[in-house]
């Protein structure tokens, strides 16, 4: 299951990013085995292209082998925690980048990455197959759109059936007494799903201060017992009661901020296929994310980095993503797997905000959120 994130505030950001650097360095040996294919490549030096990403990056071995066969480059993946922490880390290390390509910055923090000069412009091949409305840096091509997804509240169907309670469907529902102490969400400073949920509430309720707008809404959520954790993995895999992530004991929160594509993740590999996923989606709580890849400024292997970005827009990679990272491909002619289509929730009218408004308001909103929710 995928996550994403960005933005951080003060000492919390620096501490999180520093911890992530150590964690990522410690995991390099594991990434070499999981993220590298040797078929057709000479290995080492300029024949290796390094992809820096969040923990939820995944691709089939056969797909990475196809990239190696086509280009001669092997792929080394360096994962750096939740996507928000990974972006923070990339900014802190931008003068000495740890890789060639960064994948995982989305529209909630895109301006911050661009303003910090993380990327070297590159116009990827096959951009003609990508809708214009997701090409948010079309004038300069510093980043290339790779996937999209909707951040939404998910619910544990069994819990609500067992308690004879209708699951919530909208932002407004979540502050009702019936759902007290049921929701877990992610910290907006360290997790992009958490930040996207905040932006969705701002798009829904507006930016009035005090007891109005999104700030008033979050005060109500806090009073209604919302739980906040650092990452998507912690929220979904540990605290959410509907997750089947191989844990010994289920969490006790039947509502979690996750994705509209979470339901098929709970069904893949289950036989016989159930009539519906055990996880449902509150379709009135969704915010649209677009995720990008970019050639890191100062990359050692720029040719390999460009080749990898091109490959990530190819039909081969795009059609592999839905059941690897549970995201929607951006390529118009990509075909999604039947199980992804059958069980995933397609959101006709997700909330969204213009990139320029996110850029102008994000830092102030994150600071205000911290003061309201974490104090």
Image (cartoon, grey):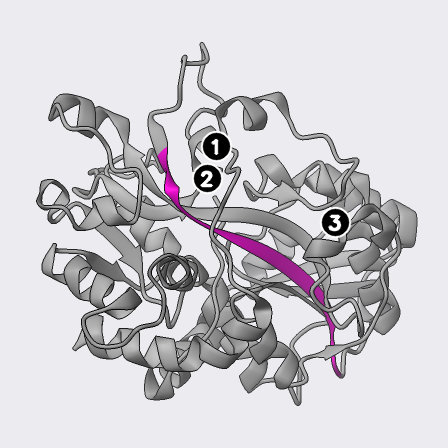
User: What is the spatial separation of the Cα atoms under label 2 and label 1, in whole angstroms?
Assistant: 5 Å
Report the residue at 56% width, 28% height from top.
Answer: 340
Q: Is residue 283 magenta?
A: yes
Q: Where is residue 64 in the image (x, y as percent from the top left)?
A: 75, 46
Dot 2 alpha-carbon crowd within 10 angstroms: few under 14, some 14 to 19, many 20 or more: many
First reached walking from the N terminus: tag 3 or tag 1: 3
Between 225 and 134, the one nearer to me in the picture: 134
Q: Name the residue under label 1.
A: 345
User: SS of the residue at dot 3?
Assistant: loop
Please report contact status of discs 2 and 1: CB closer than 8 Å, yes or no.
yes
Please report contact status of discs 2 and 3: CB closer than 8 Å, yes or no.
no
User: What is the spatial separation of the Cα atoms under label 2 and label 3, in whole angstroms?
Assistant: 31 Å
Dot 3 alpha-carbon crowd within 10 angstroms: few under 14, some 14 to 19, many 20 or more: many
Say whether residue 327 is left or right of residue 4: right
Say whether residue 16 is left or right of residue 308: left
Residue 37 - label: 3
| Magenta residues, start to end | 281-297
Report the residue at 69% width, 65% height from top.
Answer: 136
Q: Where is residue 112 in the image (x, y as percent from the top left)?
A: 56, 79
Between 66 and 183, the one nearer to me in the picture: 183
Q: Where is residue 10 in the image (x, y as percent from the top left)?
A: 36, 88
Report the residue at 47% width, 64% height from top.
Answer: 5
Q: Is residue 18 magenta?
A: no
User: SS of the residue at dot 1?
Assistant: loop
Q: Position of residue 337 (x, y in %)?
A: 64, 26
Q: Is the magenta stretch mostly helix, strand or loop?
A: strand
Residue 20 in view: yes
Q: Name the residue under label 2.
A: 260
User: SS of the residue at dot 2?
Assistant: loop
Between 303 and 332, the one nearer to me in the picture: 332
Q: Above or below — where is 171 with respect to 91?
A: above
């Amino acid at each position: 299951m995928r996550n994403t994130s960005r933005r951080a505030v003060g000492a919390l950001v620096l501490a999180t990013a520093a911890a992530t650097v150590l964690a990522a360095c410690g995991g390099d040996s594991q990434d070499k085995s999981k993220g590298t294919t040797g078929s057709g490549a000479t290995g080492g030096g300029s024949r290796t292209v390094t992809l820096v990403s969040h923990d939820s990056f995944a691709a089939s071995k056969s797909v990475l082998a196809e990239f190696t066969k086509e280009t001669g480059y092997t792929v080394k993946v360096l994962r750096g925690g939740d996507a928000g922490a990974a972006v923070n880390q990339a900014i802190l290390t931008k003068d000495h980048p740890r890789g060639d390509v960064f994948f995982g910055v989305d529209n909630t923090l895109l301006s911050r990455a661009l303003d910090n000069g993380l990327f070297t412009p590159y116009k990827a091949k096959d951009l003609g197959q990508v809708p214009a409305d997701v090409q948010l840096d079309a004038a300069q091509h510093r980043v290339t759109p790779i996937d999209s997804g909707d951040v939404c509240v998910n619910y544990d169907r069994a819990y609500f059936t067992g308690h004879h309670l209708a699951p919530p469907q909208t932002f407004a529902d979540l502050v009702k007494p019936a759902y007290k102490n049921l929701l877990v969400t992610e910290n907006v400073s360290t997790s992009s799903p958490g930040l996207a949920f905040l932006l969705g509430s701002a798009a829904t309720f507006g930016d009035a201060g005090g007891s109005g707008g999104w700030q008033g809404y979050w005060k109500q959520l806090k009073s209604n017992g919302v739980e906040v954790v650092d990452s998507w993995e912690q929220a979904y895999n540990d605290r959410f009661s509907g997750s089947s992530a191989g844990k010994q004991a289920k969490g006790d929160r039947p509502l979690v901020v996750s994705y509209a594509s979470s339901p098929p993740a709970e069904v893949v590999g289950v036989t016989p296929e159930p009539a519906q996923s055990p996880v449902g989606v509150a379709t009135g709580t969704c915010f649209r994310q677009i995720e990008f890849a970019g050639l890191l400024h100062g990359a050692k292997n720029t040719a390999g980095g460009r080749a990898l970005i091109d490959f990530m827009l190819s039909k081969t990679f795009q059609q592999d993503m839905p059941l690897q990272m549970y995201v929607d491909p951006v390529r118009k002619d990509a075909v999604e797997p039947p199980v992804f289509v059958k069980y995933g929730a397609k959101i006709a009218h997700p909330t969204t905000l213009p990139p320029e408004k996110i850029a102008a308001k994000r830092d102030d909103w994150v600071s205000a959120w911290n003061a309201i929710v974490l104090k």
